[in-house]
């Protein structure tokens, strides 16, 4: 399957089956925004739940948080975002398309990143200018590279009429909400260092070129965990988290061939280490998650700007210090796209070619579909309704009585439903040995088994746990 067409197939499936829609589509769209449809929201919720289970529930010393999207604007001064959260921007002189200079350079095999000075980036850009083409019109005429700040500004709480002078910001990353609540959590949650705070939430970035579908959005969701540690433990804890985060993807069912580590070429001055887990998206290996050792920069900055003491007193050693931070940061939307890519399959079953999303049961939007064999036989429909009503108390299941059973299987395969349950005349006792049993068809093998209705819940629950 050509890589290019895999992306097109995923985008089309997502739209056709209600996973992802273009944001504001009826108004012609709104760049950098997408909406999750009925199956998409289920899948996204399951991804969140898997992350939360791994990061909070299964850990002993990580607690959750849900901080506000808006903060005092000083937060973004302290964090360095107001002065430094920028990407290098160039504009095509011919069609005026704005692009990220680092991405254009990457396309011609050169390197620049946001940590380099603008002079350094311009020097690299000038060296390669002759070979760099505009992705839209193909011309080679560009402006100088300049910095473009990614923070999204707002007028929240500002009624002066000129809020641009004192803007408030929609958060550019969720972790700042964690840093500014470090003391609150410490004082209220009976935690001791080392401990972590995890959060899932929206973040906003004025991305210059929001491309590649839900990979690069202006409104995105992040799942971030910050571990607060003693300075001397930072690198050990960092390595532990690198290993855990890698294992997390294997546990989700990812093939390790589609994952790789990428070490940052350039570290910001305060960072000790920064590696990304890259996934093989249809457009190549790209960052899915960052794992960073951030030193004491974040708490020290907030201590300085807020005037609040954010040091930690260790009762055991009688030492006071500013905790160092190990961070894991992943985008929900990028994970979603990786999951769609990883589990998209086409195969043949019987005479049919089918598209099948081989989601692990715990991620599948719908865990089982319940079918009466025929929709015009009231006794079959009534029995199937009973089974459906019983299962839907605990699990996301779907009812389908439309078309022949083969068509119903295909529809469920496309949305990755692991089990299809058919209620037939044997269920009703036509064959007394099979009374109160149903046919359960496995999505991946197509194999069908007869299962007692009373065993269905256990079968599904076990599959979801695996
Ligand atoms: P990139 O280099 O791709 O712009 P980044 O290094 O700026 O990403 P971080 O600031 O480390 O990303 O953010 C942590 C995670 O948040 C990323 O690994 C990614 O999964 C997600 N993320 C960041 N920016 C976006 C975006 N614009 N759209 C969707 N997800 C994003």
Image (cartoon, rainbow, N blue to C red):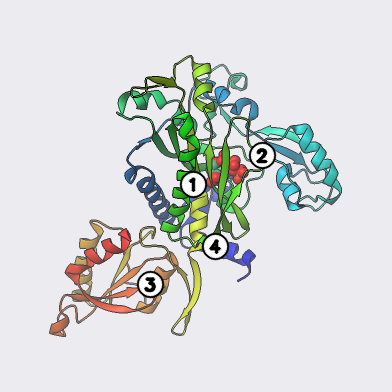
Q: Could you give the CA–CA distance between mark 1 and mark 2, rounded to whole angstroms?
A: 19 Å
Taking depth in this image into account, of 47 and 396 the one nearest to the observer is 47
Instruction: From the image, tell me which residue sits under label 2.
Output: 266
- The answer to which of marks 1 and 2 sits earlier in the sequence is 1
Taking depth in this image into account, of 127 and 147 the one nearest to the observer is 127
- List x then y, in percent, for residue 383: 19, 71
Instruction: From the image, tell me which residue sits under label 4.
Output: 257
Task: Name the side, left or right, on which 55 lies relative to 394.
Answer: right
- List x then y, in percent, for residue 109: 75, 52
Q: Residues within 10 Å of mark 2 (few under 14, many from 20)?
A: some
Instruction: From the image, tell me which residue sits under label 3.
Output: 443
Instruction: From the image, tell me which residue sits under label 1.
Output: 242
Where is residue 56, by image quadrant? top left
Q: Could you give the CA–CA distance between mark 2 and mark 4, rounded to whole angstroms?
A: 26 Å
Position of the C terminus by quadrant: bottom left
Does any atom of ligand 1 lie closer than 8 Å to the CB of label 2? no
**Residue in view at x 45 percent, y 27 percent:** 323
Q: Could you give the CA–CA distance between mark 3 and mark 2, rounded to whole angstroms?
A: 46 Å
Q: Nearer the viewer, mark 4 or mark 3?
A: 4
Q: Residues within 10 Å of mark 3 (few under 14, many from 20)?
A: many
- The answer to which of marks 4 and 3 sits earlier in the sequence is 4
Q: Is residue 33 visible?
A: no
Q: Could you give the CA–CA distance between mark 4 and mark 1, rounded to whole angstroms?
A: 17 Å
Q: Nearer the viewer, mark 3 or mark 2?
A: 2
- List x then y, in percent, for residue 277: 54, 50
């Amino acid at each position: 399957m050509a890589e290019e067409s895999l992306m097109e197939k995923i985008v089309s499936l997502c739209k056709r089956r209600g996973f992802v829609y273009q944001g504001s589509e009826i108004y012609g769209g709104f760049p950098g925004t997408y909406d999750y449809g009925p199956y998409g929201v289920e899948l996204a919720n399951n991804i969140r739940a898997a992350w939360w289970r791994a990061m909070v529930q299964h850990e002993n010393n990580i607690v959750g948080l849900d901080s506000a999207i808006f903060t005092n604007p000083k937060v973004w001064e302290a964090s360095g975002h107001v002065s430094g959260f920028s990407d290098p921007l160039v504009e095509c002189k011919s069609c005026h398309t704005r692009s990220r200079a680092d991405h254009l350079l990457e396309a011609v095999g050169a390197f620049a990143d946001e940590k380099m000075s603008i002079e350094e980036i311009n020097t690299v850009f000038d060296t390669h200018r002759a070979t760099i083409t505009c992705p839209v019109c193909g011309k080679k005429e560009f402006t100088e590279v300049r910095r473009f700040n990614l923070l999204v500004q707002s007028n929240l709480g500002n009624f002066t009429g000129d809020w641009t002078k004192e803007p408030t910001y929609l958060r550019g990353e969720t972790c700042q909400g964690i840093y500014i609540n470090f003391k609150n959590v410490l004082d209220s949650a009976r935690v001791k260092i080392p401990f972590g705070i995890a959060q899932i939430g929206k973040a906003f970035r004025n991305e210059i070129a929001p491309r590649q579908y839900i990979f690069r959005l202006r409104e995105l969701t992040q799942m971030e965990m910050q571990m607060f540690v003693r300075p001397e433990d930072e690198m050990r804890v960092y390595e532990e988290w690198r290993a855990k985060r890698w294992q997390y993807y294997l546990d989700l069912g990812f093939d390790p061939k589609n994952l790789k580590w990428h070490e940052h070429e350039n570290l910001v001055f305060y960072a000790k280490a920064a590696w990304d887990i890259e996934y093989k998206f249809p457009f190549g290996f790209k960052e899915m998650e960052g794992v960073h050792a951030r030193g004491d920069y974040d708490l020290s900055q907030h201590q300085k700007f807020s005037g609040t003491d954010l040091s930690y007193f260790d009762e055991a050693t009688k030492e006071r210090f500013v905790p160092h931070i190990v961070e894991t940061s992943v985008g929900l939307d990028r994970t979603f796209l990786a999951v769609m890519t990883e589990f998209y399959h086409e195969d043949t079953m019987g005479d049919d070619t089918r598209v099948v999303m081989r989601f692990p049961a715990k991620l599948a939007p719908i865990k089982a579909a319940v079918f009466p064999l025929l929709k015009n036989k009231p006794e079959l429909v009534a029995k199937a309704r009973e089974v459906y009503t019983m299962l839907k108390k605990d699990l996301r299941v779907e009812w389908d009585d439309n078309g022949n059973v083969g068509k119903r299987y295909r529809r469920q395969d496309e949305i990755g439903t692991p089990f299809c349950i058919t209620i037939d005349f044997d269920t009703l006792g036509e064959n007394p040995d099979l009374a109160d049993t149903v046919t359960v068809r496995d999505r991946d093998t197509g194999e069908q088994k007869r299962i007692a209705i009373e065993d269905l819940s256990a079968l599904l629950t076990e599959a979801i746990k695996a």
